[in-house]
Each structure stands twice: as C-alpha cells, then as structure tokens.
C-alpha cells in the first residue's frame, strides 16, 4: 500500500538533549495512526516535526511522495487541529473557518463551498454567525476541526484535541472523529496520552517512550501481545497484573506456587530466568467461574470498587492481583474467594530486559 507519510531516520536535538533519534515510520494512505504515550515521550514533538513547526536535526519527511523536510507548514499539504482551539475571538465561526482561505486569495465561491461542506460534515451550520465566546467547548473544538477540514488536504494532524473537554464530550467527539475519518478516508495522525482514545480510534497505534516507538501495531495486537513491560503496563485500565517469579520448564514459580503456562506460545527459551507473568484483570475469574480456569488459588479480597457494569477488586495473590468482574457479582473486603485465570492468555516478560518471551 502506498505511504501517505514517510519518515526516514528523523532526529531532533535541543542542544545536547536528544529528543528523537533516528526514528523511521511509514503511514499508509487513508490510515488512522495514533501516537500514544506519557507526557514527555516525544509524541507531540514528532507531530510538530511532520507539520513543519519544528526544524529537525537530521532525516527526511515525505508527504504524498513529496520531500517536505524543509517546506513551510502551509506548503506541506496538511491540516492541523491543536489542543487549544486557537480561534480568533473577534471573528464569527464562518470567518474563523474561511480566514486561511481568504489569506491564500482563494476565489470567494470556492471558499463558500468549502465552508459549507465543513459545516455540514461537522453539523455546525447554525453556529456560523456566532463568535467563539458564544460557543461551548465541544462546539469550539468542532470549529477548530472545521478550520483544518476546509483546507481539503491529504493529511490531518490532531494534537490532543479532546483533552480540554469533559468526559461526556470527549466520548461524543471521539465518535464524531471516527465517523469523520470513515467518511473522508484521509490520512489522520492523532496524538494522545489517553489509551481509550487510542484503542477506539486507531487503525494502528505507535506507543512511544523517550522518543522511541516501543510497539507499532493494531490495537488488538498491542492489547493482547504487548512487546515489553512498558507497553503492557501502559495499555489497559485497570492496569495489567504483574506476578514476579522464576521460569522453570513450562511453569512460573511464585511464592511456592507453580503456575503452569499451558498453551502459552513461548517466543524464546529462558529457562531458569526471573520473569514477570502479566494477566489482564478482565481475564481473572472469581467464584464459580474461577473453577473453569486452568489455574486457581484461594485469596482474600482487600479493596472493592463498584463501577456499575463492572466491579474491580484487589486480592492478595503475589503483591496484589486485580480482578475485573461483572457488576452483578457481590464482592466485599475480607471475603475469601477462589480466583483463577488461564496463563496462556497472559504475557511473560524477562524481568531484567522487560522484553516479551
């Protein structure tokens, strides 16, 4: 498949500090790629390099086959949506949408058509005569997205566009952005530290740490087969359970308890090594459901968090084992329960390197 955005050995230094070093990435035409990671991992910096807002120290950037490494942002064929809405407060919504087109001296009829198309797609037609101060946060963000849409470009860049919104609005606009991508089929690169946004929006996720892409794959693969402890711990809420032990044959020894790995697909042999067995809380069963699991152990519940449809509980297995059960299951602190899981559904990592085995 043809690459829409291609990054070759990109490096960015701020003085003696290497923020990104020799990063290469290909993004397919029409793909929705999410750059995900904690604050300071380099995801927004990478996006700004693609946009031309930062001058890179080395490497090349291609957009739609054209080398744009040293092109100005306006000449790169991109539309960008920022975390802050960055709207002109004295202008109406219509003027905000059309401002860049008017500066580029586009014909008035063409401007009118593009503004109308963007407002129809984003359902902001009734707001065109209002000023930003008369809009809600969600409406302002729609206008900010519309300002990028009117450019009618091949690549759209989103820099944490929903982080200033409340939870309900974030959820609604997430759906709108997904619908927008399915309708336009343009390439979209989206930066976020919110794993829910990443999992729900992305065709592929690039998880970053210290300027390095740790894993680049589909949400399904990243969730079920994380390549290292960092990725495993970053994806998932509640976070993955980590049980430290020693690998002996096809089982992990943990505090005198042997956990058989069963059908777990080992990628390499590290017999006798210290390992970490990772199990997702939703893969841990309690009570009668636990009896069906290949590995079971009796434990005591320490903390319970009722969450409506789910109940999250912490049990005394290893340092702690988190369980995500149905909200219909009655659990309470101090209760003795049987917990069980299938180790084959888990992930095993080397304790020293953190890499999956």
Image (cartoon, helix red, strand yellow):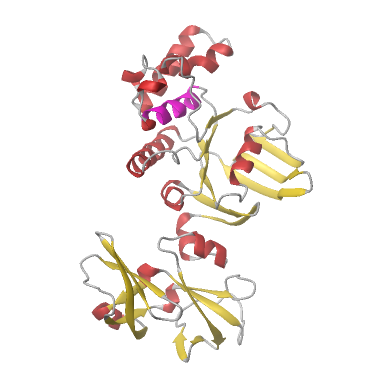
Q: Is residue 117 left or right of residue 228?
A: left
Label total for image: 0
Dominant SS of magenta comes to helix
Q: Nearer the viewer, residue 200 or 326?
A: 326
Quarter assignment of residue 271: bottom right
Note whether 46 is above or below 295 in the view shown: above
The residue under the point 70% across, 28% down is: 71
The residue under the point 28% across, 60% down is: 307
The residue under the point 54% across, 17% down is: 100
**Residue 349 lies in magenta, yes or no?**
no
Q: Quadrant of the C terminus?
A: bottom right
Extreme-right residue of the structure: 16
Note whether 329 is above or below 46 in the view shown: below
Q: Give the magenta part as a residue range.
A: 139-150
Extreme-bottom residue of the structure: 256
Question: Where is residue 94 shown, x and y percent of the image?
Answer: 42, 15
Question: Where is residue 180 shown, x and y percent of the image?
Answer: 41, 34
Question: Where is residue 28 shown, x and y percent of the image?
Answer: 56, 43
Note whether 158 is above or below 72 in the view shown: below
Q: Is residue 311 left or right of residue 19?
A: left
Question: Where is residue 204 shown, x and y percent of the image?
Answer: 51, 50
């Amino acid at each position: 498949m043809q690459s829409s955005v291609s990054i070759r050995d990109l490096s960015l230094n701020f003085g003696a500090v290497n923020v990104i070093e020799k990063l290469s990435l290909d993004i397919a035409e029409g793909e929705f790629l999410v750059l995900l990671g904690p604050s300071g991992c380099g995801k927004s910096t990478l996006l700004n390099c693609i946009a031309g807002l930062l001058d890179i120290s080395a490497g090349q950037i291609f957009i739609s086959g054209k080398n744009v490494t040293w092109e100005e942002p306006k000449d790169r064929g991109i539309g960008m949506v920022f975390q802050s809405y960055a709207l002109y407060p004295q202008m109406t919504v219509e003027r905000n949408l059309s401002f860049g087109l008017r500066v580029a001296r586009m014909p008035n009829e063409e401007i009118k058509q593009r503004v109308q198309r963007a407002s129809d797609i984003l359902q902001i037609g009734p707001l065109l005569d209002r000023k930003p101060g008369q809009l809600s946060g969600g409406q302002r963000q729609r206008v900010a997205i519309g300002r990028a849409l009117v450019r009618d470009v091949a690549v759209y860049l989103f820099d944490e566009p929903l982080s200033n919104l409340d939870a309900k609005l974030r959820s609604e606009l997430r759906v709108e952005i997904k619908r927008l991508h399915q309708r336009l089929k343009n390439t979209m690169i989206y930066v976020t530290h919110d794993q829910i946004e990443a999992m729900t929006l992305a065709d592929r996720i690039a998880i970053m740490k210290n300027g390095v892409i740790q894993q680049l794959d589909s949400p399904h693969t990243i969730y079920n087969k994380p390549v290292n402890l960092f990725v495993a711990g970053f994806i998932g809420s509640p976070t993955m359970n980590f049980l430290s032990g020693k690998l002996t044959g096809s089982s992990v020894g943990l505090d005198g308890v042997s956990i058989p790995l069963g059908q777990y697909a080992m990628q390499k042999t590290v017999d006798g090594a210290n390992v970490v067995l990772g199990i997702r809380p939703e893969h841990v069963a309690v009570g009668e459901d636990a009896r069906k699991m290949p590995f079971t152990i009796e434990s005591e519940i320490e903390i319970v968090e009722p969450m409506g449809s789910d109940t999250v509980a912490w049990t005394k297995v290893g340092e702690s084992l988190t369980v995500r059960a149905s909200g219909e299951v009655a659990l309470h602190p101090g209760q003795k329960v049987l917990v069980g899981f299938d180790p084959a559904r888990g992930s095993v990592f080397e304790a020293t390197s953190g890499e999956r085995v």
